[in-house]
Image (spheres, rainbow, N blue to C red):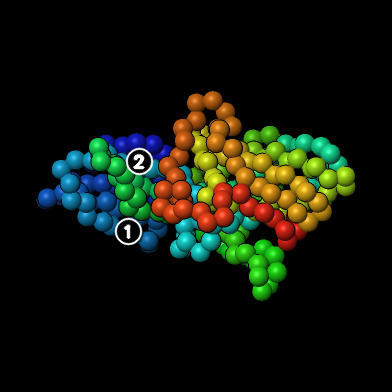
Amino acid sequence: MYGDYKIPFEVADDELSLSVKKESGGYTYTRQMGEDVVSKQILTDSANLNISPIEPLNLPMKLTSALLIELENTVVIKPQSTQHLFLTFPVELGVFLYAQKGKKNIDIFSLVKPKYTLYGDVSEGTICRYWKSSVHTGIPQVDKLREGVIELVIKNGSLEWIEMHRVVFNAYGMKIFYDRELVAMKARMSIRGEDTSVTDFKNTPIRKGMRKALEIYQKERQPLKGTKFLMEGGL
């Protein structure tokens, strides 16, 4: 479903249907998921449409730029070592109209119901989009309309064995790529101590031939504190 389309067009499966149909004076965009229907009038002679995975922090509204992934199993990391693992993350989809003069986001939706949690202290903690992931040593099989894969490189620079229960990322740094089978990102985690680490993303795909997804956070708003996330509330 991801990729470019010439309008009019229509795609559908058992859970989701998207269409842009010709009407008098323009087109009608319709998205239906069960009983949920979104419809918009598009006043144009011609345009193209792109469906892209986007940063999963837009629904039901932009409450935060932080994504917290809780690990199903605790990971124990050797001192002074670098480790690789793979996690999953929730996927949101953006629908964009584009012509010669630029792109316009007209719809954002997800097949995954969003959940939120608090990271850190109750009074001064960070609201985060919440996701629970199993831990993998290779790329897991996922439904690309629901889940993406993060290849995470963990560098434990401390002199201690570290137990890791969660990881938090900043949406402003996310660099999502996709192909016909997979939505994915590459990320890094630098552990400074038992309760402190820094996370960020790499602007490269996890395998050749992947296309870079459209970005919403970097295009619409400028980050005030950079693109990394400083985890000081525990790993």
Which residue is at the front of the view, 19 or 198? 198
Q: Secondary structure at mark 2?
A: strand
Residue 71 visible somewhere in the drawing: no
Rounded to the nearest angstrom, the CA distance separating label 2 from label 1 is 17 Å
Q: Residue at x 63, y 52 (%)?
A: 229
| Residue 143 point in image, percent of width and height | 54, 43
Residue occupying the point 34% across, 36% down: 4
Q: Which residue is mark 2?
A: 50
On the question of residue 68 being in view, the answer is yes
Residue type of the residue flagged with mark 2: Asn
Please count the marks in the image: 2
Contact between labelled residues 1 and 2, with CB atoms less than 8 Å apart: no
Query: Looking at the image, is 212 positioned above or below residue 57?
Result: above
Marking on residue 38: 1
Disc 1 is placed on an element classified as strand
Relative vertical location of residue 214 with respect to residue 109 in this rendering, above or below? above
Residue 155: name its quadrant. Answer: top right
Q: Residue furthest bottom?
A: 123
In this view, the residue in front, 146 or 203, is 203
x and y, in percent, of residue 235 in the image = 75, 55
Viewer-side residue, 152 vs 133: 152
Mark 2 or mark 1: whose residue is earlier in sequence = 1
Q: Residue at horizontal 52%, vertical 56%?
A: 224
Q: Nearer the viewer, residue 198 or 216?
A: 198
Q: Is residue 235 left or right of residue 213?
A: right
Q: Among all residues in the image, which is located at the extreme left?
A: 24
Residue 57, image x, y percentages? 51, 56
